[in-house]
Amino acid sequence: MALRRSLDALSVLSTDDLADYDVISDGPRSLESSIADLGQVTRLAGSEPPPLPSAREKFDTVGLTAEDIQAYVQRSIGAVTSRGDEARTWRVYVDGVFGPLTPRDVLQLRQAKLSFPSVHLLVGVFSDEVCEENNIAPHLPHADRCEVVRHCRWVDEVVPEAPWTLTEKFLRSRHVDYVAIDEGTSIDPDIDRERLKGYDLVKSLRKAIPTRRTYMSTPMPKSVDPFNKTAEKVDPEPSADRGAVKGASASVAVEQGADPSADIRDALETPFEEPPEPASFEEPKIDEFGTGHGV
């Protein structure tokens, strides 16, 4: 019955009314023309929402356009892009800990993605074992870090088995055209010498492109900088030779090793003991200026 009603409704429309919707037969528009119309849809792959004004003030690389980034890369590698290169998709590689993924990391990935008109961005994430071998605290498990990177809008492929030291064999196996290296990255040469060897290899192969380091108006906390191995030393408790309060004498200092729960235990052992009577109130002495002595 429902099918009968739908056919009756369709019969009200004329052939001319249905012609614009028929892309296969009998209509003035062919299947090829309809598919051609799909190619005219605006591509949104390279679009991005505008940053907040506060972000423009805080992160100096937020305002870089794709043209700025590509011109900077071309000047660095000393190459002129030909027509064939413009249509080519370049495979660019970036690696890191990404635990957590910070604005500085994301802005570097953005520059790597926009370094050429068409880029397939590969992002290597160091494993927990690699981080432990090199005294790096990732703050997040490897699976979590890979998943966060995978959802970044600029990333096309995640490489979970990223090597600490880049080799020519690894670059060939992943068909890497260029490696994006953040300029000014602070790496301790005594500890990360093997990592520097990989960067030197990439530069010798002319496969390195620079990304401008993001400087922030508010410094990044050291706790989220995985390559900073200098920890701030904080005195957990005051020493016995100085007061707990700045400038206080040693007589009012907190005794080192004192048990804070001792008073509570004493109160529980003698719960019915009457508290000592308060001392009698004494009027403060007044000097000629109307203030108390010792105030």
Image: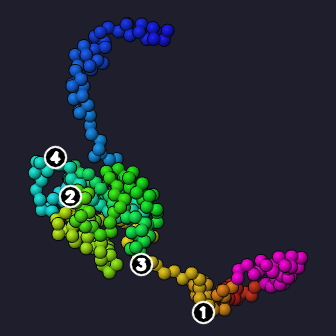
What span is colored magenta in the figure?
A: 259-283
Q: Quadrant of residue 72?
A: bottom left
- Work out whether mark 1 precedes mark 4 in sequence or the reverse, and give the earlier one: 4
Residue 264 counted in the magenta span: yes
Secondary structure under tag 1 reads loop
Disc marking residue 241:
1
Q: Are marks 1 and 3 in contact (CB under 8 Å)?
A: no
Pointer 4 residue: 87
* Above or below for 59 versus 155: below
Report the colour scheme. Answer: rainbow
Disc marking residue 200:
none
Quadrant of the image for the C terminus?
bottom right
Look at discs 1 and 3 and give the one toward the viewer.
3
Pointer 3 residue: 230
- Left/right of residue 117 with respect to residue 99 in the rendered view: left
Pointer 2 residue: 177
- Is residue 212 visible to the viewer in this orientation of the structure? no
- Work out whether mark 3 precedes mark 2 in sequence or the reverse, and give the earlier one: 2
Distance, label 3 to label 4, CA atoms, is: 46 Å
Residue type at the position of mark 4: Ala
* Residue located at (79% from left, 84% from top): 283
* Residue located at (66% from left, 92% from top): 251
Residue 68 or 151: which is nearer the viewer? 151
Distance, label 1 to label 3, CA atoms, is: 28 Å
Q: Quadrant of residue 183?
A: bottom left
Residue type at the position of mark 3: Thr
- Left/right of residue 271 with respect to residue 34 in the rendered view: right
Residue type at the position of mark 1: Asp
